[in-house]
Image (cartoon, grey):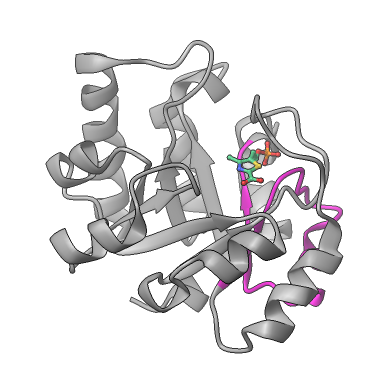
Amino acid sequence: MNAKEYVRKYFIMGSQNCSRNPIHILHEALEAGITAFQYREKGAGALTGREKVELGKSLRQLCARYDIPFFMNDDVELAIKLEADGIHVGQQDTPVADIRANYPHLQIGLSISNVKELQQSPLELVDYVGVGPIFPTTTKEDAKEAVTTKWVTYVRHKHPNMAIVGIGGITTENATEVIRAGADGVAVISTITNAKDIAQTVKKL
Ligand code: 3NM
C-alpha cells in the first residue's frame, strides 16, 4: 500500500457527521473516487458499543468491495475486530510504538500540529502524517487554531519523502492550495458529508 497515493482524497466520517444514512454517503464517495476512508465515530452524538461496531462492519465491507483502504480512528481494539487496513491516532492516543510492535501489518497515520510534536514523534514508525487544522473548522470540537498551508510547506521541507495529508476546513476551493504547499493529499469530513453532489465534489478535490 502506497501512502502517498492513498492519502490523495481521504474521506473521514462518523454517523455524527451525517444528516442521512452514512452507508449511502460512503457508497457515493467510493463511487466518486475517494482513495481512503477513516471511520471516526467521535464527539457529540456519536454511536457507542454495539452500534458503533455494527456501523463499522458495514462501512468496512463497503471499502473492501471498492478495494479502498479502511482506517479506524483511535480505537485499536475495533481496528483489529474490523480487520482495518490501518489506524489513525492523535498525540494523546495509543502510542505509535505500541501499535507498531503489536500489529506490524497495520498502516499507521499520526496527527501532527506543531514543531514540538513533529520533533517528538517516531516518524520512522508511521506511514503518513496528518497536518492541521490547515483552515478553521467547526467539525472537530477540540480543534486547535488553524496552522495554515505554511505548516504543510514546513513539514514537507523537513521531511521530503514523507506522506503528508492536510486536514481541517478543506473545500473544493482551497484543496489545490494545500497540495501546492506540499501535501500529497487532502482529508475532509464536512465537504463530502454536506455535499449536494458528492460525485462532483470528490472530482474537484
Ligand atoms: N482533525 P472538516 S481537523 C478530524 O487538525 C479533524 O487534526 C483535525 O473536518 C486536525 O473537513 C478535523 O469538516 C476536522 O473541516 C476536519
> Is residue 10 a member of the stretch shown in magenta?
no
At 29% from the left and 22% from the top, the residue drawn is 52
Task: Examine the structure image and report whether residue 166 is included in the region drawn in magenta.
Answer: yes
Residue 113, position in %: x, y?
Answer: 67, 54
In the image, 183 versus 204, the foreground residue is 183
Quarter of the render that holds ligand 1: top right
Q: Nearer the viewer, residue 102 or 106?
A: 102
Q: Is residue 82 left or right of residue 5?
A: left
Residue 146 seen by the camera: yes
- In this view, the residue farthest toward the top is 45
**On-image quarter of the N terminus:** bottom left
Q: Position of residue 74 (x, y in %)?
A: 37, 41
| 16 up-or-down from 157: above or below | above
Q: Is residue 53 above or below residue 135?
A: above
Query: Horizontal and vertical percent for residue 205?
Result: 70, 58
- State the residue at coordinates (78%, 52%): 134
Q: Where on the picture, by quarter, is residue 176?
A: bottom right
| Residue at the extreme bottom | 160
120, 2: nearer the viewer? 120
Residue range of the region highlighted in magenta in the rendering:
164-189
**Above or below, comparing residue 77 to residue 10 in the picture:** above
Asked if 44 appears above or below 88 in the picture, the reply is above
The percent coordinates of residue 54 (x first, y second) are 21, 23
Residue drawn at (25%, 43%), measured in percent from left and top? 76
Identify the residue at horizontal 39%, vertical 30% (top origin).
23
Residue 92 relative to residue 157: left or right? left
Q: Is residue 13 left or right of residue 105?
A: right
Name the one closer to the observer, 56 or 117: 117
| Residue 151: quadrant of the picture | bottom right
Q: Is residue 7 visible?
A: no
Q: How many marks?
A: 0
